[in-house]
Image (tube, rainbow, N blue to C red):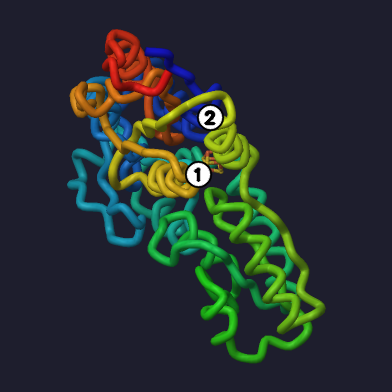
Amino acid sequence: MKVIRAKSAGFCWGVERAIDIARDIARTKEKPVFTDGPLIHNRQMVAELQGDGIRDVGDYQSQQDLRLNEQEKENSVILVRAHGISPERRKYLKGIGMQFKDATCPDVGIIAGKIRIHAKKGYSTVIFGDPKHPEVIGLMGYTEGQGHVVQTIEDINALPHLGDKVCMVSQSTMFTHEFEELSKRLKERFPETLIFDTICGATKERQSEVITLKQKGAEAIVVIGGRHSANTCKLVALARLQNIPTYHIETAAELEVEAMSQYTAVGVTAGASTPDFLIDQVCETLKQIEPAATAKA
Ligand code: SF4
């Protein structure tokens, strides 16, 4: 079978950078690294990192107190994930007696900076994103208590009157077409709104490549990544919007040979937290599958 692999499949640069920072500390300084929540939403990669002395202690949303004893805190490092954290969380982590290291993705840092600057000038911030996602929870901390998270047009319609000092940003991994739709509606309600499209370049590239996989001849799309990985689930949703059979798997072992043999060409992409070795395994497995006689020619 022909396999069309998206060039953007796998780690985005922000996740890769966070992993490199964690590994660098663990290897060169020979210190255990604790991350404030899972560094990456991929079980297979988490297991690899544990082998390097990197493990998560915080909760998914980076909100609860860390459960580490004094001995564990001593001579170890607490690392902030690519998602970033709120100023309050930063203060907390810096005050617990551990060496502090920040691996916030610079693209998330830019969003936080835009919110902070405008909040200080009295702007209300509207964030398009998932209110339970750690990136959004962290960003809300920069809004000076004047932040609102929206996911739908109805959420925008339900916003209280915000006056003429309003700015809008997006969680870095949202859909561009949805951001455009929601920002248009927000402008109708508050015409002075400043709109900042903060969906990151890595996300935009990944999303546009899903659309081109079909144009390149893919009869189905396989999306590889954790079932709890938000950006992987978004890729799955986008692939389904192309009206093409879509399969969400975590590893090659989940590929169903009979189902796959219906196709002669399959597109493969993966979430920003999926390591290359898992993508390679899936592509190799697919290449070995012979299309059935009834498969589209
Ligand atoms: S998805 Fe974008 S903003 Fe998030 S870590 Fe990756 S590059 Fe950074």
Distance CA(mark 1)–CA(mark 2): 10 Å
Quadrant of image for the C terminus: top left
Which three-letter amino acid code belongs to the residue tagged 2?
Leu
Q: Earlier in the sequence, mark 1 or mark 2?
A: 2
For the question of whether residue 13 can be seen, the reply is no
Query: Residue at image x 28%, y 59%?
Result: 65
Tell me, yes or no, whether the two marked residues, 1 and 2, touch with CB atoms within 8 Å: yes
Res 99 → quadrant:
top left
Give the answer, above or below, for where 10 lies relative to 206.
Answer: above
Q: Which mark is residue 242?
A: 1
Give the SS element for disc 2.
Answer: helix
Q: Is residue 154 left or right of residue 113?
A: left
Q: Residue furthest bottom?
A: 161
Query: Residue at image x 74%, y 80%?
Result: 188
Q: Is residue 60 left or right of residue 84?
A: left
Query: Residue at image x 66%, y 77%?
Result: 124
Give the answer, above or below, for where 115 lies relative to 135.
Answer: below
Image location (x, y in percent) of residue 165: 76, 80
Other-residue count near label 1 (Cα within 10 Å), few / some / many at <14 / 14–19 / ≥20: some
Image location (x, y in percent) of residue 236: 40, 43
- Residue topped by disc 2: 213
Query: Residue at image x 40%, y 41%?
Result: 232
**Residue situated in front as seen by the camera: 272 or 286:** 286
**Residue situated in front as seen by the camera: 28 or 134:** 134
Q: Residue furthest right?
A: 192
Quadrant of image for the N terminus: top left
Image location (x, y in percent) of residue 79: 40, 40
Which three-letter amino acid code belongs to the residue tagged 1?
Gln
Q: Residue furthest front?
A: 294
Q: Quadrant of ligand 1?
A: top right
Q: Which mark is residue 50?
A: none
